[in-house]
Amino acid sequence: MELSEKQAIMRIVYYGGSVEFFTAVFVAFLALTAVGIWRREIMWGAVRVLEGFANSVGRFFAWAGLLMVLQQIVIVFLQRIFRVSEISFGPLGYSFTKDLSWWSEELKLYNAMIVAMCATYTFVQGGHVRVDLIYSAVSHRTKRIIDMVGSLIFMMPVAVLTWMYAWYFLWRHLITPKPSASDTLDKLMLKARAVRWNVETIGFSPNGFNGYFLFKVLLLAYCGLIFLQAIAFFYRSFLELIEGEESAGKYLDRDTLGEGEEAYEGTH
């Protein structure tokens, strides 16, 4: 790589976990909140966009569950019945051949996709398990206040802290010399002269799955989705607090099993 490219990589490493980056995000959040308080339709628009994004991402990656099941069935048949030791996959004339153990361990990636990319989708759909001690017994107004406080005090800080850990955890397994969260921009620029790609390709077994850096990418995506959903949930709770109980569930896009299946929809 050219020195300019190496320095660009180090700038990405620095600013992706920097105070400047989170300050810019926080200022943007405050600005959007202020505009949304002035014009509620703008805040409702932000809610619809963010919840729609969470739903779209979740509905897409939910298909990884089906792919995981089908791949497991193929592996069992090839291993137990046909005694095959490897699988070749050759779309468009490109042959991709891996040991059967590689494909077996790769199933964990599908599971990680579902957990990381469908978490906010499940949140929008109301599918997460909740331990309810007082929430159901309080008034609509108190519920919305609890939701707002939860978004600001729990969801956002946890997403930011996890992002900070995951950001450097990812880059330490992509490049060398390894960056640190304590490195200043000047120090990273000095390291840039020696930087090179060193993507983690170590598996748990000799012929096993070796793309574990993808799990670290998914962890970052998870943090970003959670942070965006926290904003959407805060805005929705605020608007439902201001507009009253009749606005509860306004513009909420939830999946349905179809007419006549309403009794089963609350059992997920």
Image (tube, helix red, strand yellow):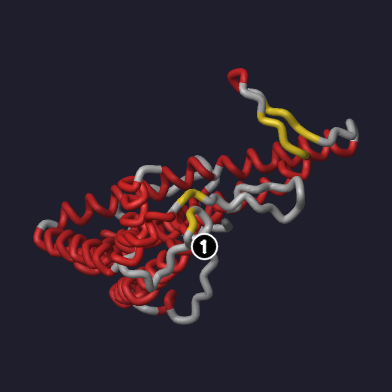
Query: Which quarter of the figure is the C terminus placed in?
Result: bottom right
Q: Nearer the viewer, residue 63 or 143?
A: 63
Q: State the residue in front, 253 or 183.
A: 183
Q: Quadrant of residue 68?
A: top right
Residue lying at the far bottom in this picture: please name it. 134
- Pick the residue in front: 89 or 178: 178
Element assignment for label 1: loop
Q: Is residue 266 above or below residue 186?
A: above
Are there few (<14), some (14-19), or many (20+) residues within 10 Å of tag 1?
few
Q: Is residue 119 left or right of residue 80?
A: left
Residue 205 visible: yes
Residue beneath the point at 37% across and 68% down = 160
Q: Foreground residue, 98 or 200?
A: 200
Q: Can you say whether 133 is above or below 13 in the image?
A: below
Residue in the picture at 73% in, 48% down: 208
* Kind of residue at disc 1: His
Quadrant of the image containing the N terminus: top left
Q: Which residue is mark 1?
A: 128
State whether residue 244 appears in this view.
no
